[in-house]
Image (cartoon, helix red, strand yellow):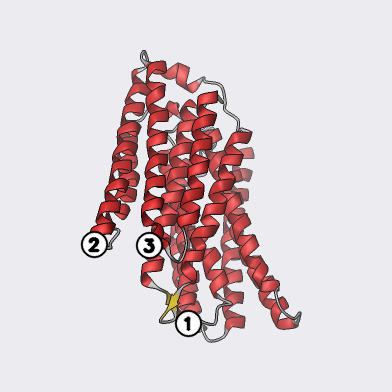
């Protein structure tokens, strides 16, 4: 049985998957608009909470679907219908993602729950195709139950909001999904997942997220052209480039895409990588917002960048043989994070130096990763 799993035909990313991703890029862009309601010099607390919830919910929907396609996708008519139904329902989520989100709370949660039920049924329909494969049956049962329970919690969140005006059950639903899948990974066979396909799908979504960042950066080029606007637009562009290059080294050179793994930890860490990339996009937009106080937007920017890099540590277990990240690199990451944060706070009143330090920091991480990879590449070729 295990031999059959490890020798299965390699999956390729299909057009339907890329089309499916585009609706999520659109919704993530809508999520960022939630941050543009300011109170006391930063995003209003309720709106920030809504932003966190909506962003994590949307990314989680994407991961549930991607994991299913990786395991059981066959480009069948039933699969296409299921994906297109979810794409259509995502428009209702996007429409409900607005400054007046409370008025759309019920619409958002009904669409969210229906999407989860749809994914759950996609797993259930696979049950009959794997009756003689206990490894697959176990995985199907666990994922079906987890997603079904989360969908029920999402529906219960409607009643909670109607009666109390709070959304804690919504947060509980997201956290339940994340931790339940993570805990269930201990019982998942490593050979089930085509990690090459899974890592490529995630990489493409990360690239789409960088695309959103580049679009947001366009605001730096607005207004009268002068040396000041040129400087900040160039620095903003270099920040995006440095962040992108660092992920490129990790994905292209360090991650072992042929690894036999269940891939669950990898996909869960990327929920947060994409989340922090969205935060960086919003933070770059904040830099031009006079309504946002200097200190909060500086903290938001450097905290998001630091957490983006910290996530790299948690995917170190997927490194190629002999390229596991050395403890010294972890020490460098922690020390450099502390120095970066301290300099950002100390020089917060000098935006020229502040943004230059950010550029230096992101490129220093890229150079460290690049040199680290080249060193190990040389050793492996000797």
Q: Which residue is at a point 46% across and 21% down the rendered structure image?
A: 5
Mark 1 or mark 2, whichever is nearer to me: 2
Q: Residues within 10 Å of mark 1 (few under 14, many from 20)?
A: some
In the picture as drawn, the residue positioned furthest to the right comes out as: 225
Which is nearer the N-term, disc 3 or disc 2? Answer: 3
Q: Which residue is mark 3?
A: 102
Which is nearer the N-term, disc 1 or disc 2? Answer: 2
Q: Which residue is mark 2?
A: 164
Residue 296 placed where, x, y %? 44, 77
Q: Specify whether residue 362 is in view.
A: yes
Quadrant holding the C terminus: top right
In-front residue for pair 103/135: 103
In-front residue for pair 176/227: 176
Mark 1 and mark 3 in contact? Answer it, CB < 8 Å: no
In-front residue for pair 370/133: 133
Vertical comparison of 348 with 341: above or below:
below
Q: CA distance from mark 1 to mark 3?
A: 26 Å
Q: Which residue is mark 1?
A: 293
Quadrant holding the N terminus: top left
Q: CA distance from mark 1 to mark 2?
A: 32 Å
Residue 183 placed where, x, y %? 30, 40
Residue 184 falls left or right of residue 29: left
Residue 315 placed where, x, y %? 46, 47
In-front residue for pair 94/175: 94
Identify the image quadrant of residue 167: bottom left
Residue 64 placed where, x, y %? 43, 39
Label 1, secondary structure: give it: loop
Vertical comparison of 309 with 257: above or below:
below
Label 3, secondary structure: give it: helix
Mark 1 or mark 3, whichever is nearer to me: 3
């Amino acid at each position: 049985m295990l031999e059959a799993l490890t020798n299965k035909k390699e999956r390729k990313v299909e057009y339907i998957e890329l089309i499916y991703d585009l609706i999520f890029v659109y919704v993530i862009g809508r999520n960022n608009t939630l941050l543009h309601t300011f109170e006391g010099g930063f995003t209003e607390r309720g709106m920030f909470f809504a932003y966190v919830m909506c962003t994590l919910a949307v990314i989680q929907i994407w991961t549930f679907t991607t994991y299913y396609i990786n395991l059981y996708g066959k480009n069948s008519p039933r699969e296409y219908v299921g994906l297109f139904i979810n794409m259509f329902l995502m428009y209702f989520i996007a429409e409900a993602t607005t400054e007046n989100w409370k008025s759309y709370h019920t619409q958002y949660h009904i669409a969210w729950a229906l999407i989860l039920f749809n994914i759950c049924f996609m797993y259930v329909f696979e049950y009959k195709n794997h009756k003689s494969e206990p490894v697959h049956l176990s995985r199907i049962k666990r994922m079906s139950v987890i997603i079904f329970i989360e969908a029920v919690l999402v529906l219960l969140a409607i009643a909670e909001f109607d009666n109390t005006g709070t959304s804690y059950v919504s947060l509980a639903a997201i956290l339940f999904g994340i931790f339940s899948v993570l805990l269930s990974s201990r019982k998942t066979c490593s050979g089930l997942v085509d990690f090459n396909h899974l890592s490529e799908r995630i990489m493409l979504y990360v690239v789409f997220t960088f695309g959103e960042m580049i679009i947001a950066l366009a605001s730096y080029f607005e207004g009268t052209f002068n040396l000041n606007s040129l400087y900040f637009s160039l620095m903003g562009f270099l920040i995006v480039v440095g962040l992108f290059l660092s992920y490129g080294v990790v994905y292209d050179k360090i991650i072992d895409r042929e690894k036999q793994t269940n891939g669950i930890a990898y996909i869960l860490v990327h929920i947060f990588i994409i989340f922090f990339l969205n935060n960086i996009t919003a933070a770059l937009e904040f830099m031009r917002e006079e309504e946002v106080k200097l200190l909060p937007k500086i903290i938001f920017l450097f905290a998001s960048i630091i957490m983006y890099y910290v996530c790299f540590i948690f995917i170190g277990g997927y490194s190629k043989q002999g390229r596991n990240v050395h403890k010294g690199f972890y020490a460098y990451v922690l020390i450099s994070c502390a120095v970066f944060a301290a300099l950002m706070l100390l020089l917060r009143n000098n935006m020229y130096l502040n943004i230059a330090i950010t550029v230096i920091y992101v490129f220093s991480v890229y150079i460290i990763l690049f040199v680290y990879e080249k060193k190990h590449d040389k050793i492996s070729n000797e």
